[in-house]
Image (cartoon, helix red, strand yellow):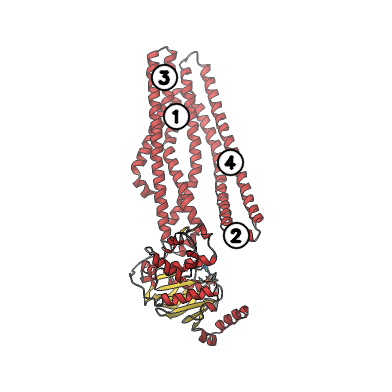
């Protein structure tokens, strides 16, 4: 709850007006039956002047109530939407500062739910609270007291009705709370299935998985329908049930009034007011029960957003320097273990790379190549040992300097929906057309970009579905080189390119980025055999470090990989 404190302060004036206006509205609601009672009394006494006076007062009070209601909705919506927007932006900003391990702890899917659905739940909770929290107790206590003062003899009818309704609503709302929890889980599951299926539609179709996936979806969807139907039944039974209790109470009240009507004829005029107060008490209990059911969901959502906001980013800039990176890289006895893993992924790795060198990294799948590259970009900090750039520990270099000097072309290409130019400018914000053309030339992307009428303004669709694997990789490389980084990491970035294009990219890199330290992670030795040096990883250990010919002679692991790949080619 304390994450709301600061926001409550910001919107305190709006909250104040929302509460005041709802109190005015509740007051008007309570006053109306009393005025009606006075009108009926005056009618019975044939006092037309009093009827007119109270009639005007009744209309005035109803208008005040209406204005109170409108103002309350306006102020409540301002507060709820304002706080929701602030929370969303604050949480998004926090997520931006997260390291990869922070994000992995939450999982991307769950973070998205927290930024969207959970924020919406909190918004509803705030709206509901401002509309009802002050109104319910005023209405309940006020209507109760006024009902008893209207017909004091029948206080016990009121008490009996309240006890019955509270007992019934306790049972009902508790049950509904459980059902709502299950509905939420099912909705989450259905969303996940739908999302995975749509994103992986090619896999689903190519493996003929439509029926299986449909069955999974139908199963959860049927369960959801069943639950919603049960909730519907409960709701449909709830209102008539409560009305039955209220009507029984009204019948009993009328019966007892009729018994004494000869001696107290004015009690007849009190009946409509008593009945209205009785219904207001019923309304207050029902709304109170509903709010508590929904509030528990909103509070869970608030706690989940709080977890995001209170997480301290793993990688923080403390005692750091801004520097212009030259491209010297050193690993000093580096070991690394992923936060959620029991295995040590990198073990006691040490090496040096000089500025401008081109170094390949090879090793079996899962040997730690990507992990090693990620430590260079400080996506993670080593668990042991140091990573240095230009002889400075990475921890003492500002992340801004690192991002400026290092470009990392990921193994799994991620492009954003938008134009080709917009995607390239992620590598250099103010890139000119000439710079884009040069980058596209290096990445061998010009040929297909030039085929589009709108060239760099051509739109890339969601999940870059309108591009081939090779085209995506080429654009990703172009984005990586456009800022002329001092360190360029290519993580299996040419796997979808044919051998000729791969060679052309490598030649272009050697010509245009000759001062850049280039690290090429590759499955195939042929992709790195011309590198100045090759690092060989085996199960997280560095087992070879040298040029191709030397490694062939000195590294058994390298030789084995080379022989296996050559055998496959033959
Ligand atoms: N985020 C993670 N959390 C836990 N373990 C991970 C994570 N990422 C990778 N690993 C594990 O670390 C090991 C090394 O993975 P890495 O991706 O560095 O290997 P790689 O040599 O690049 O493999 P490939 O050639 O298949 O891309 C693997 O066993 C992998 O399962």
Marks 1 and 4, the one that precedes in the sequence: 1
Label 1: element kind: helix
* Residue drawn where x is 41% and y is 22% of the image: 35
* Label 3 to label 4: alpha-carbon separation: 42 Å
Task: Reply above or below: 387 against 548.
Answer: above
Residue mark closest to the camera, 4 vs 2: 2
The answer as to whether callout 3 falls within 8 Å of ligand 1 is: no
* Residue drawn where x is 53% and y is 33% of the image: 165
Marks 4 and 2, the one that precedes in the sequence: 2
Residue mark closest to the camera, 1 vs 4: 4
Marks 3 and 1, the one that precedes in the sequence: 3
- Mark seen at residue 231: 4
* Residue drawn where x is 54% and y is 36% of the image: 167
Dot 2 crowding, Cα within 10 Å, few <14, some 14–19, many 20+? few
Residue 94 percent location from the top left of the image: 41, 58
- Find out whether the residues at labels 1 and 4 contact each other: C-beta distance under 8 Å: no
Dot 1 crowding, Cα within 10 Å, few <14, some 14–19, many 20+? many
Residue mark closest to the camera, 1 vs 2: 2
- Find out whether the residues at labels 3 and 2 contact each other: C-beta distance under 8 Å: no
- Mark seen at residue 202: 2
Task: Reply above or below: 416 against 299.
Answer: below
| Quadrant of res 465 | bottom right
Q: Is residue 161 visible?
A: yes
Label 2: element kind: helix
The residue indicated by pointer 1 is 143
Residue 425 percent location from the top left of the image: 41, 63
């Amino acid at each position: 709850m304390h994450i709301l404190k600061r926001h409550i302060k910001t919107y305190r004036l709006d909250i104040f007006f929302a509460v005041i206006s709802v109190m005015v509205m509740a007051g008007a609601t309570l006053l109306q039956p009393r005025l009606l009672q006075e009108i009926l009394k005056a009618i019975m006494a044939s006092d037309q002047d009093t009827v007119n006076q109270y009639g005007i007062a009744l209309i005035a009070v109803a208008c005040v109530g209406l204005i109170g209601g409108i103002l309350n909705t306006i102020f409540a919506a301002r507060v709820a939407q304002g706080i929701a927007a602030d929370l969303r932006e604050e949480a998004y900003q926090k997520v931006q500062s997260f390291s990869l391990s922070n994000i992995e702890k939450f999982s991307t899917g769950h973070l998205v739910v927290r930024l969207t659905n959970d924020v919406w739940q909190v918004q509803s909770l705030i709206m509901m609270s401002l509309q009802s929290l002050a109104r319910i107790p005023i209405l309940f206590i006020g209507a109760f007291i006024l009902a008893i003062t209207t017909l004091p003899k029948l206080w016990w009818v009121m008490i009996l009705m309240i006890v019955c309704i509270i007992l019934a609503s306790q049972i009902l709302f508790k049950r509904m709370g459980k059902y709502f929890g299950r509905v939420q889980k099912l909705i989450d599951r259905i969303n996940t299935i739908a999302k995975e299926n749509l994103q992986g539609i090619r896999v689903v179709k190519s493996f003929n998985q439509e029926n299986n996936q449909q069955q999974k979806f139908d199963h959860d969807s049927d369960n959801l329908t069943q639950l919603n139907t049960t909730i519907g039944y409960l709701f449909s039974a709830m209102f008539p049930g409560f009305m039955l209790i209220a009507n029984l109470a009204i019948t009993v009240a009328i019966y007892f009034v009729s018994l004494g009507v000869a001696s107290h004829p004015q009690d007849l005029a009190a009946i409509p007011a008593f009945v209205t107060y009785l219904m207001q008490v019923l309304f207050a209990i029902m709304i109170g029960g509903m709010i508590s059911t929904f509030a528990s969901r909103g509070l869970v959502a608030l706690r989940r957003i709080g977890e995001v906001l209170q997480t301290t980013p793993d990688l923080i800039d403390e005692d750091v320097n801004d520097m212009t990176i030259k491209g010297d890289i050193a690993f000093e006895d580096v070991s690394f273990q992923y936060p959620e893993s029991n295995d040590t992924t990198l073990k006691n790795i040490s090496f040096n790379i000089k500025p401008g060198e081109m170094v390949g990294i090879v090793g079996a799948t899962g040997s730690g190549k990507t992990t090693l590259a990620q430590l260079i970009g400080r996506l993670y900090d080593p668990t042991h040992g140091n990573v240095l750039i230009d002889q400075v520990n990475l921890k003492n270099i500002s992340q801004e300097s690192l991002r400026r000097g290092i470009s990392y072309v990921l193994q799994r290409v991620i492009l954003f929906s938008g134009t080709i130019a917009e995607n390239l400018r992620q590598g250099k914000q103010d890139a000119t057309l000439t710079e884009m053309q040069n980058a596209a030339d290096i990445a061998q992307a010009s040929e297909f970009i030039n085929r589009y009428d709108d060239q760099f303004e051509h739109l890339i669709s969601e999940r870059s579905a309108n591009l081939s694997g090779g085209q995506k990789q080429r654009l990703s490389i172009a984005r990586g080189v456009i800022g002329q980084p001092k360190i360029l990491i290519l993580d299996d970035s040419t796997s979808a390119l044919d051998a000729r294009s791969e060679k052309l990219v490598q030649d272009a890199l050697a010509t245009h980025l000759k001062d850049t330290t280039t690290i090429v992670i590759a499955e195939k030795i042929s992709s790195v055999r011309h590198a100045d040096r090759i690092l060989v990883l085996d199960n997280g250990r560095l087992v070879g470090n040298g040029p191709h010919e030397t490694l062939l002679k000195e590294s058994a692991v390298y030789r084995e990989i080379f022989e296996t790949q050559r055998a496959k080619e033959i």
